């Protein structure tokens, strides 16, 4: 089986437009709203979502990015010398509705780690989850609030999200591992 392109730039843009509108609608506006991206792909998508909401609503949203490397339950299995990226949350989380953003949700373990990390920075009013791709296969009872596309990959297939900010093109590709 060869790689299959599931989404290209315009598809990703449409999904992010819809997710941005859904976030504003579900939260009855943007009061107390904040956006936090999970490294790495989630940071880029969070910036895009934040920009769309700010442009549409005419306000500046608190935003940040989160590294969950040391919160993962499998970090020691991945590497004895994990590469820790920068967490940057320059606002108080108390009295905020935090929208966590990631590129793909699979087992739910990354999101569990992200929620643990967020709680170390404060106690938000709520935590919501926005993902570009939901690929199923949960091991934990964690579900996204906002989804771009739901996929059902074949066993052994991998989902790769390529973003302009890092890969110089936007695409979602399914390929064999």
Image (cartoon, helix red, strand yellow):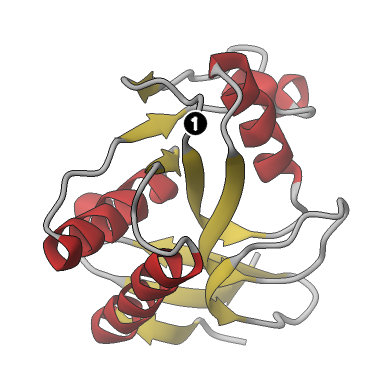
The residue that disc 1 covers is: 95
Would you call the spot at circle 1 few (<14 residues within 10 Å), some (14-19), or many (20 or more)? some
Q: Position of residue 121 (x, y in %)?
A: 54, 17
Q: Quadrant of residue 112?
A: top right
Q: Position of residue 60 (x, y in %)?
A: 17, 44
Which secondary structure lies at badge 1? Answer: loop
Q: Position of residue 25 (x, y in %)?
A: 42, 72
Q: Is residue 121 above or below residue 68?
A: above
Answer yes or no: is residue 164 visible.
no
Q: Residue at x 35, y 48 (%)?
A: 31
Q: Residue at x 46, y 86 (%)?
A: 6
Answer yes or no: is residue 105 visible.
yes
What is the count of numbered marks?
Answer: 1
Looking at the image, residue 58 sits to the left or right of residue 141; the answer is: left
Q: Is residue 80 above or below residue 139?
A: above
Q: Nearer the viewer, residue 109 or 167?
A: 109
Instruction: Give the position of the C terminus as an image quadrant.
Output: bottom right
Looking at the image, residue 85 sits to the left or right of residue 97; the answer is: left
Instruction: Give the position of the N terminus as an image quadrant.
Output: bottom right
Q: Residue at x 64, y 23 (%)?
A: 119
Q: Nearer the viewer, residue 109 or 93?
A: 93
Q: Quadrant of residue 5?
A: bottom left
């Amino acid at each position: 089986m060869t790689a299959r392109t599931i989404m290209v730039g315009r598809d990703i843009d449409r999904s992010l437009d819809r997710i941005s509108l859904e976030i504003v609608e579900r939260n009855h506006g943007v009061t107390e709203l904040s956006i936090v991206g999970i490294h790495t792909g989630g940071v880029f998508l969070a910036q895009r979502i934040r920009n769309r909401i700010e442009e549409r609503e005419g306000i500046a949203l608190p935003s940040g990015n989160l590294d969950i490397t040391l919160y993962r339950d499998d970090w020691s299995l991945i590497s004895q010398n994990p590469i820790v990226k920068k967490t940057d949350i320059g606002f108080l989380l108390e009295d905020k509705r935090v929208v966590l953003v990631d590129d793909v949700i699979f087992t739910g373990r990354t999101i569990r780690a992200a929620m643990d990390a967020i709680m170390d920075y404060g106690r938000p009013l709520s935590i919501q989850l926005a993902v570009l791709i939901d690929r199923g296969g949960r091991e934990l009872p964690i579900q996204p609030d906002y989804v771009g596309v739901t996929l059902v990959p074949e066993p052994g297939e991998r989902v790769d999200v390529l973003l302009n900010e890092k890969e110089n093109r936007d695409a979602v590709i399914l390929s064999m591992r």
